[in-house]
Amino acid sequence: MVVDYSHLTGDHQFFQTVVQFYKNQPVFSLTTQKYDDKQWVILTYLRGAAYASIHDKNWVNPFLSRAQFFYRLVRPGWDNSACGGGMNWGPFTKYKNAVTTELFIATAVGMYEAFHRDGMLEASIRAWIWFKNSGMINAQGLVNDGLTTTCQYPLIVFCGRRRNNGQTTWTYNQGIVLSGLSKLYKHTGDPSLIEAAQHLIDSVISSGLVPADDGILVESGDQARTCNQDQWMFKGVFFEHLGYFLWDVAEMQELTVATRVALLQKYRPFIHANAHAVWTVRGEDGTVSSYWSEPSDHRQVSVETLGSGVAALACAVRVDLLLESLGE
């Protein structure tokens, strides 16, 4: 969020914070984590390098080197021996969950943009093709947590089909893939990628994840205050990647201005509703809890919940700036 804030506002006072984060990051500890954790590192430094390229070019190569180091650790996670492909959650598990492959779609195409190696683009395309056919996207158009351990239906008649495990449709699993799809479209020109992204966003807005007419996104466990610290970040991740998706779309010169404006305006009310909710329910001390439909009660308030709220605000600012740049 520090990089996004700096990009959006032009306020560069926190760049040294990013640098210190790079210098003091527990790299060895992160190398022992699961593949999804490693990919958050990749995305962080790809964004950091893009920011450094316009602020302090001395840090572009160090940030990209860190991203490349972790990408090399992640690539062996692709596994054709179970479920016909997809990323394993970690080196010692065969579980195929949504987040790890969604992240791989985004990280592989992001690495392609940074290093221009065709194999990276091919890896991202392969991951998307597998993901969309894997069964993780349910009949409501939402992404569940992953596949069953056997990747198959129990009835023999369905043995050739992979099976959705029916677990929680976490909000971040509806968002991460969006930024990967927009970048894949940029490099392939395949309109089905933008259509798939829109269908996923539309499915979220019309689903139980947005249970009330006020348009506020709600995580499973928000209202009961049962979310854990990881889950406190999920809505922020959704809006972060929704913002990246719309940013990419707004810069696609092959699309007419009218098309780009229409897409931004389509989702602006939903984005603004959530940003307004965050701003309205924040505490007197500026804190934001995990549940945006009620005033902050300090029961679930942390750096994760605050960062999630800031991500929603940043997404709204980004959409307004993009529309302004397109003459709206």
Image: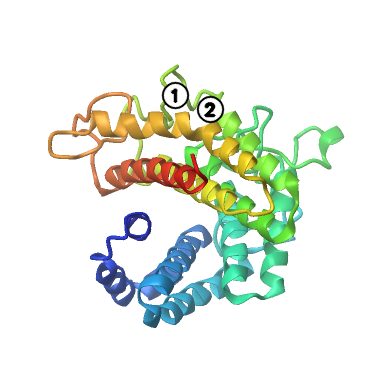
The reply, left or right, for residue 225 in relation to residue 192 is left
Dot 2 lies on which element?
helix
**Local crowd size for mark 1, using a 10 Å CA cut-off: few (<14), some (14–19), many (≥20):** some
Could you say where residue 304 lies in the image, as x and y percent from the top left? 30, 47
Circles 2 and 1, Cβ within 8 Å, touching? The answer is: yes
Q: Is residue 78 above or below residue 297?
A: below
In what quadrant of the picture does the N terminus appear?
Answer: bottom left
Q: Residues within 10 Å of mark 2 (few under 14, many from 20)?
A: some
Q: Quadrant of residue 195?
A: top right
Image coords of residue 179 (percent x, y): 56, 52
Determine whether 268 is above or below 99 in the image. above
- Kindly report the distance in space between the C-alpha atoms of the residues bearing marks 2 and 1: 7 Å
Residue for badge 2: 205
Q: Which mark is first along the chain, 1 or 2? A: 2
Given residues 185 and 125, the one toward you in this image is: 185
Return the residue found at the far front: 327
Q: Quadrant of residue 256?
A: top right
Relative height, residue 159 to residue 88 (above, below): above
Mark 1 = which residue?
Answer: 215
Q: Where does the image place residue 10, in percent across and percent down from the top left?
A: 32, 60
- Outermost residue to the left: 285
Q: Percent position (x, y) of residue 213? A: 45, 17
The three-letter code of the residue at mark 1 reads Gly
